[in-house]
Image (cartoon, rainbow, N blue to C red):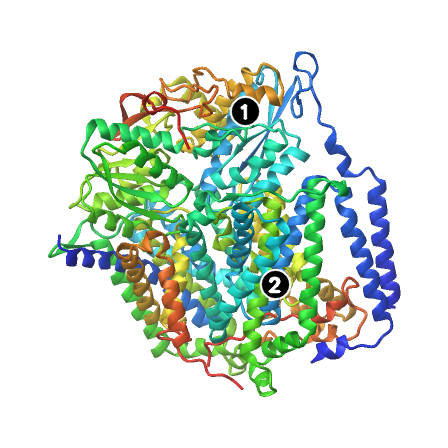
Amino acid sequence: MSTITASLGTDRVRWLRPTLTVLVAAAVAVGAPFYFAPFQVFQLTMVLVYAVALSGLNLLTGFGGQISLGHGAFFAAGAYTAAVMLDRYDTSHLATLPAAAAGCFLLGLGFGVPALRLRGLYLALVTLSFAVFLPPLLKRLEPVTGGSMGLTVNKMQPPAWSGLAEDQWMYFVVLAVTAVALLLARNLLRSRVGRALLAVRDNESAAEVMGVRLSLHKTLAFAWSAMFAGVAGCLYTWVIGFVSPDSFSFVLSITLLAGLVVGGLGSLYGPLLGAAFVMYVPSVSQDVSEAAPGVVFGLLIITVMFVAPTGLAGLPGRVLGAVARRPPRTTAALDRMPEAESAPDAEPESQALSGPSETHTPADPAVVDAEPVGAPPRTEKE
Amino acid sequence: MSAVTDLLQQVVEGLGSGAVYASLALALVLIHRFTGIVNFAQGELAMLSTYVAWQLVASGMPYWLALPATLAVSFAGGMLLERIVIRPVQGAPELTVVIVTVGLFIFVNALAGLIWSFTVKDFPQPFPDGGLDVSGVRMDWSTLGIIGVVAVVMGLLYLLFQHTSIGLVMRAVACNPASARLSGIRVGWVLMLGWGLAATVGAVSGVLVAPVLFLEPNMMGGVLIYAFAAATLGGFDSPVGAVVGGLFVGVAETLTGAYVDVIGADLKVGVPLVIILAVLLVRPQGLFGRAAVERA
Amino acid sequence: MRKTTALRAAAAATAALLTATACSSQRGQDAQDTTAGGACKGQQTTGITDKTIKLGGIYPLSGPASAYGTISKGVAAYFSHVNDKGGIDGRKVEFVVRDDGYQPPKAVEEARRLVEQEKVFAVFQTLGTPSTAAVWDYLNKQKVPQPFVATGASAWGTGDQHPWTIGWQPNYVAEARVYAKYLKDARPKAKVAVLYQNDDFGKDLLGGFKKAVAGSGVKVVAEESYEVTDPSVSAQMASLARSKADVLLDVTTPKFGSQALAADAKNTKWNPLHIVNNVASSAAVLKPVGFKNVQGVVSATYFKDPADPQWAADPEMKAYKDALHKYAPDADPANQFNAYGWAVASSLHQALDAMKCPTREGLRDAVRSLKDVKVGMLLPGVTMSTGHGDAFPLETMQLMRFKGERWQLFGKPVDTRKEFGPAAK
């Protein structure tokens, strides 16, 4: 419950800080496309697209404690919804967004029902097999989806009044959608739904006893999460202008989950960091070693997990915490032996961080939500 | 050939694929029993072990000498991996460990490509050519050999889990490391042992399937998905379940691919999915898994 | 305390932003594409000077299709080799390789990087149908040549929406026609079973084959597909064996090619004529199966297989092996993908030599007006030709049969243009 008490903190300064942060972030975000070269703007756009998908996955995994390895499939569903509408029915780009969102919400609702019975590992693997199954299915539905050749659709064009280049316009559109999506994710978590989710994650039985309607909330979590992935897929189609079944292999699902964990589970800005990781690190890997970028990429994932076991979002907190309180406990946090600690949710120093100390990173008002989580309840144990 | 012979032939093919899935599923079950995690890199580690065997044979070592050497290297390598790569994140959230294995997957795959290139390698077949022919149904010695070895490994694991003290110790560690440590169990060693054994079983799997699938860095990528399906179906705790699950998935996908035209070879991967989903909805712990007891 | 931290952070960020905008924005540089004067007035000379020419290639160096990444080594070795001999028409080639991991969004990103940041003269090559399809709209809009893409889909030559993009290798439809013609001549009543990869490559080849045998006595009696993510094709092979077809058309990529050949060899009750498509016909694919198991297998080719001893004394092959040894010592010269890279790079060399203007427009036009251009690495009798209404450089292939330890070419090179007319969508 520390979350709730912390977010109810009445400190007057708490007002000023987020306002300023938001203003600065907005200024940077709006200024970026006028400064960077078009292809860098494109990269930023893709970061935002992935961030939307990751924040959806975060709802489910970070806050809901359920692991999905099938979010690439929802992403694909959203992308194909948009592409098919643009290709077959010549709809406007904007019209595809609600359709992709609603479609994936319903799809997620359908998946949420078995998700009620399955947890942790089993849910992860069932969703993974869904992700494996989708590409051949898309190929089979050739009359609609264009089969294995995929569909090429028009990208969004800037209106004449804007005076912007294509990449800039695209960036702003995606930025707007992302901002709305991230706000929505934030508000969802602060709502009844979010509190129920956190309660369920932390202790399912207790939550149920306290009157949380378990099945409803778990199903809804899956649906919301799928909707975010679908919206991201729709944005993907707008930006790339091309979809093909093999673009959405199960590797995408695994990449999304890896990105989220690297960025930081259960943190509101973890998805942004994770998206940046997914976007930029493969290029960096190639600069390090052209012969085998995969070797570097794999090592970087492992290294980040070593340095920041709770994700990049938790890193500043860990570092500051380590500096603030001299060794004995904190160093143990980095290379903690299994003998030393058992249950992952017993993270003493992070609990301390979520209290009102000034070791917070100044970047986000929601840092209180960043307590490390992610340990899905283990099911099949006695 | 009659229709019945055809059908039986397809069943045999399915058993052949199923045995391949089962062999890797055993390694997945093993590591899960020991450490409670899902190791995405298990297939890639098996592939790496197979390359070690290939390298030994290619440099002139006789096959039956190279095999035990490979198993020993894999065991040591698995233990080392636990100590160096997994131990530092052991206390972190479970997902962190899983993502480390994803990183390992990418790393090992690229490393094998870097060292041995992506060209297909021929791997020596320990079983004789040819096969049995029972009234028109052909079964290769290699298929029988794989099934036989998988059965032996399954039996050994069953004995290990049920009839040795290590089985008990390991279950204690996977369930609750802290309590296990308090009762005097050396948790670190148990986890290392788990990784070492899983790597060894994986090496057996890789060496078995390499002559059939042909050795290249992506050899185990496709197998992994089916091995997951097999383990899920059978229950992630049970070696018997992994083998039954593997054979069932193999036969089910082969038969539907061959006989149900609407599904066909392209969508057959959906069949195990549907079966798994159905089984899990009825029995969430899998066919042979233990029912989860909720701690209130 | 908090207040000051926040204010400081805000101030720092604002300052950073202001500095950034004050400095010349990175954005300003992109509009300065250069143009030529004289007879070539107004044409783009980005990426090309009198001394240099800059090319960018996008290959899967990581991910599931990494096996093809080595093509870039063959290409790079060729350009290094040419640079040592003075370059192409006095211009040194700078070849930038980027990795897309076989993912279309990465391909788009890398194509934009090559065009906007690296300012390459042309994007040579993109590999794979998905990646190529994802970037060709962009490249054509930017008027950047995309010559000789490393995929045989027929789409690259059939439309007229993308004049800046052109294929190179014989398209899959053309290859299918070669097999169709062979069967119509040699086995006019053949019943054919087809194993194909369920993507553009397999579908294109299968479709082309069906069209080419339509109306003849050759019939497709069974077809089975597999996904690249499948571990094995043994189940599909068992299904095909039920058809009792007398010909097996094997449309697979290397690993699955080896599996299919091995499965065919093991099944002693079904002995069809095995036709393996070009992609899986390298000696490197057949060797693991055992040469004794692949006797009599038929395929078609258009460039010299470096693993084939019959080209050991060929001067171009010698130059290739020396150069690869020198510039890419870790690459295997016997790998046919390296030789493919060499062949396509030397083809581009010919096209660059044929440019009337040293401009992007010059290259675009040059690759579309090739007249029987000979390339050392291509088989004797196989030449590049394009022209009005024909955007497929290579459409000739020669059949070969495996005998002993090597492929033996037989018959004359089959020019599918003459036999079947232009490839239509």
Depth-wise, is mark 1 or mark 2 nearer the camera? 2
Q: Position of residue C408 (x, y in %)?
A: 27, 25
Under mark 1, the amino acid is: Phe
Closer to us: C198 or A119? C198
The residue shown at (56%, 46%) is: A90
Under mark 2, the amino acid is: Gly
Closer to us: C72 or A77? A77
C30 to B39, vertically: above or below: above
Please state if B226 lies on the left or on the right of C52 as rendered: left
C330 to A123, vertically: above or below: above
Please state if C35 lies on the left or on the right of B279 as rendered: right
Number of dots carrying numbers: 2
Residue at image mark 1? C79
Residue C410, located in which quarter of the rendered image? top left
* Secondary structure under the numbered disc 2 in the rendered image: helix
Q: Position of residue C251 (x, y in %)?
A: 33, 39
Residue C145, located in which quarter of the rendered image? top right
The residue shown at (70%, 60%) is: A180
Chain of the residue under label 2: A
C217 to A305, vertically: above or below: above
> What is the C-alpha distance between the residues marked 1 and 2?
47 Å
Please state if B148 lies on the left or on the right of B293 as rendered: left
Q: Is residue A346 visible?
A: no
Residue at image mark 2? A56
Q: Position of residue A287 (x, y in %)?
A: 62, 41
Please state if C155 lies on the left or on the right of A200 as rendered: left
Q: Are marks 1 and 2 on the same chain?
A: no
* Quarter occupied by the C terminus of chain B: bottom right
